[in-house]
Image: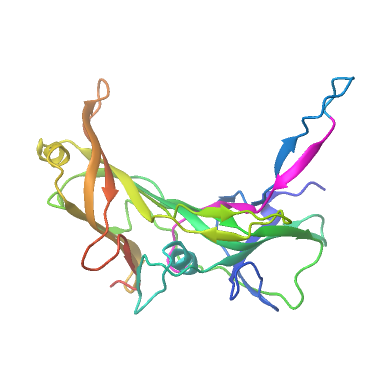
Amino acid sequence: MFAMADGSQLAYIKESEWGTTPATPAWQILRLTGESFKIARETKQSAEITPERNVSDLIHIGGGAEGGFNFELSYGAYDDILAAMLYGSWDANVLVNGVTQSSLSFEKKFLVDTATYNYFRYTGMIPNTMNLSIAAGEIITGSFDFMGKGGSVAATAVASSTYVDAAAENVLSASSHVGALSLGSFSTAKILNLNLSATNNLMSARVIGSLDNADIGAGQFNVSGSVEIYFEDKAVYEAYLNATEMALSVTMGITTAEKYTIELPRIKFSDGEVVASGQNSYVMANMSFQALGDPTEKYTMKITRAVV
């Protein structure tokens, strides 16, 4: 039998010590639309000269773990990963980007035949990037990408493993489940799509004697994005030309107290254009933006959950 995606499962658990899966883990199953986790191996071809003109060897020179997963947004499904991404923790249902690193172990479980599974595990995984796409007429989608220490493959589960079912809240759409979208003084603008991207600019440390990464370090937390607006007047483009500072906020959810609000208190447009792309089409203002740190609150991004 060939393994199919319908027989696969991705789960995670928070680590107490970087790179070490807790004993008797209670794995949290994830909702996802696709994944790309792998045990990394960097190779280098031997430079030996042979009389036969053949390549004599291919050598492993580096390793680690990398990859991530794509998702459709639903309430409560990714709170732990959001906290790890922002190097922070939820405090009274509020999360802001900080400086405290936390790590995760991931496990992929594939059904090989009717009664046999293979397990692929990845340790010391730190979120490096996050993307979120909110587009009219579409499901709200996103992705996380990670860097980690290393991984392993096994034919059996970790001893005394248990598995917690994934959150079961409804998937959110941009048309039905965005309650508020504010963009500076353009809160009444007609917006076609909004894209957010965040990165921790992670760095991996190599050491002699190991293929695994010895450490994962964080660089600058950087948030950027783009917004496509139906053109109504020149004010939005002038905001780009004049480097006007503004705030961005979006609230997503279905049920009272089961919503998220993402806030960027300071953004500036980094690029912009107003274009007529062709016949029988609307004139659009396509604007890119850069988020900036708030000098008073000391954060760039704020996420509030359980919003009413």
Judge whether residue 78 is colored magenta.
no
Magenta: main secondary structure equals strand
Q: Is residue 258 left or right of residue 19?
A: left
Q: Is residue 183 visible?
A: no
* Residue span colored magenta: 56-76
**Looking at this view, is 283 or 129 the one in front?**
129
Which quarter shows the C terminus?
bottom left
- In percent of width and height, residue 217 lies at 51, 59
Q: Is residue 188 left or right of residue 117?
A: left
> Which residue: 55% across, 59% down?
216
**Looking at this view, is 116 or 272 the one in front?**
272
- In percent of width and height, residue 238 lies at 11, 38
Q: Is residue 113 left or right of residue 104?
A: right
Question: Quadrant of residue 272 in the image?
Answer: top left
> Which residue: 10% across, 40% down?
235
- In percent of width and height, residue 37 lies at 63, 52
Judge whether residue 59 is colored magenta.
yes
- In percent of width and height, residue 153 lies at 77, 58
Residue sticking out furthest to the right = 52
Question: Quadrant of residue 45 in the image?
Answer: top right
**Looking at this view, is 11 or 75 the one in front?**
11
